[in-house]
Amino acid sequence: MNHSPAVAGVDTAVFTVPTDAPEADGTLNWDSTTLVLATVRCGNITGLGYTYAPAATARIIEDLLATVIAGLPALDVPRMNEAMHRAVRNAGLPGVAAQAIAAVDIALWDMKARLLDLPLVHLLGAAREDVPVYGSGGFTTYDDDQQERQLRGWVETDGIPRVKIKIAESWGRCEERDQLRVAKARAVIGDATALYVDANGGYSAKQAVRVSRALADEGVTWFEEPVSSDHLATLAAIRDHVTLDVAAGEYGYTLPYFEHMLAAGAVDCLQADITRCGGITVWLRAAALAQAHGLEISGHCAPHAHAHAAAAVPNLRHLEWFHDHVRIERLLFDGVLAPDGGAVIPSADGTPGLGLTLNAERALPYRVC
C-alpha cells in the first residue's frame, strides 16, 4: 500500500507589474511583465512555482494540468511532470503549455522539499556552494545616464563582476548606436568586469559577424542570440566566424529543442529557462544534455526559480540576474536572495523548499486574476 501523501490541488494567481521605465531589446518593447503563480497543496503544506507568461497560462493549469496531478503521490515529481506533458498533447506543448507545466513542476519540487523539511538544493544534491550571477538589463530604451546607473549598481554596489546589455536596436538598424553604447558600458565598468551583449536575434548573419569585430575590440566575451535561434545552421556558422562565445536556448520549450541546438554545434554555452522548458525536471535534463556535449549551461532569467537547481549541476556557468524579474521577485516574494560579490547561495538560511513565500499584502495591488 502506498502511504505517500497525495497532491490535493493546484491554485493559480496572475500578477502584472509595470516596468520602472520604458524597456526594449533588439526585437521587442514592453511596459509591463506578467507572472503566473501556481500553488500546489498537500495537506497543510504548499509549494509555489511561477512562470513569466500570458495570463492565459493560468487557464491551462486549471483546465488541463490540475486534474491530472490531483491524487498522485506528492513525492513523485517526474511522474507528474510526464502526466502533464501527456495532458497537453492536443493543445500543443511549445509555448504557454510548457510554461504552465513549468510553473506547476517548480511548485511540486518546492512542495516535495518542504514535505521533507529540506532546502531544495539539498534534496537535489548540491554540486557547488554558490551560484555565479551576471547583471542583465541595459535596455535599448535607456539613455546614457540610465545605463550608467544600472551598471554601477551591479558592479559597485552588488559586486557583480559580469554584466550584460541589449544591442541590435530596432532589428539591427541602429548599429552605430549599438557600438557606442557598448563602448560607454566598457568605460563605466572598467576592464576588470566581464561585458556581455544580447542581440535577441535582431541582426542578419553577416551583420552579426561584422558587429562581433567591434564587440571584440571592447573585450565583449558573450554574444547572445546574434541571429534568431530558429536558424541553427546560421547560428553555427556565426559561431565558427567569431571569437566571442555564442549563447542561445532561452526559447527552448522541449528537450529535443536543446538536442537539436547542441547537435548543430550552434552554441558555446547552452541557455535554458526553467520557467519555459517544463520546470526543474526538464531543466536538469537539459543541463545533463549540455554536459554530455562538453558544454556549460546558463540559467535564463527568473533567478529565484533557478537558483537551487543551478546549484545542483556541475556544468553551470552562471545565472541571469535580470533587472525586471529581480524587481518583481523582490516585490512579490519574501525570502529573496542577494547577489553579494556576484553570487547567490540558495540554501544559506536552511529554509525548506525554494525559500520563498508570497507576500500577499505587497502582491495584492498587482493581482489581475
Image (tube, grey):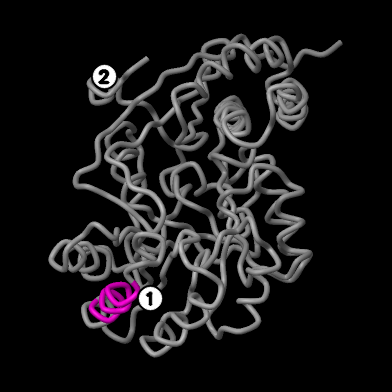
Residue 179 in magenta stretch: yes
Residue reaching furthest to the right? 1
**Numbered circles on residues, count:** 2
Residue 357 in the image: x percent, y percent? Answer: 39, 28
Q: Which residues are magenta?
A: 175-184
Residue 364 numbered tag? 2
Prevailing secondary structure of the magenta residues: helix
Nearer-the-camera pick, 112 or 286: 286
> What residue do we see at 69% from left, 13% from top?
6
| Circle 1: element type | strand
- In this rendering, position of residue 148 left or right of residue 225: left
> What residue do we see at 64% from left, 67% from top?
296
Residue 293 numbered tag? none
Residue 198 in magenta stretch: no
- In this rendering, position of residue 187 left or right of residue 369: left
Image quadrant containing the C terminus: top left
Q: Which residue is mark 1?
A: 195
Q: CA distance from mark 2 to mark 1?
A: 37 Å
- In this rendering, position of residue 253 left or right of residue 4: left
Nearer-the-camera pick, 107 or 350: 107
Residue reaching furthest to the left? 145
Nearer-the-camera pick, 94 or 359: 94
Residue 166 in the image: x percent, y percent? Answer: 36, 63
> What residue do we see at 36% from left, 26% from top?
358
Whichever of labels 2 and 1 marks the residue nearer the N terminus, that label is 1
Within 10 angstroms of label 2, few (less than 14), some, or many (20 or more) residues?
few
| Circle 2: element type | helix
Position above or below: 125 against 100: below
Q: Of the residues shown, which amino acid type is indicated by label 2?
A: Leu
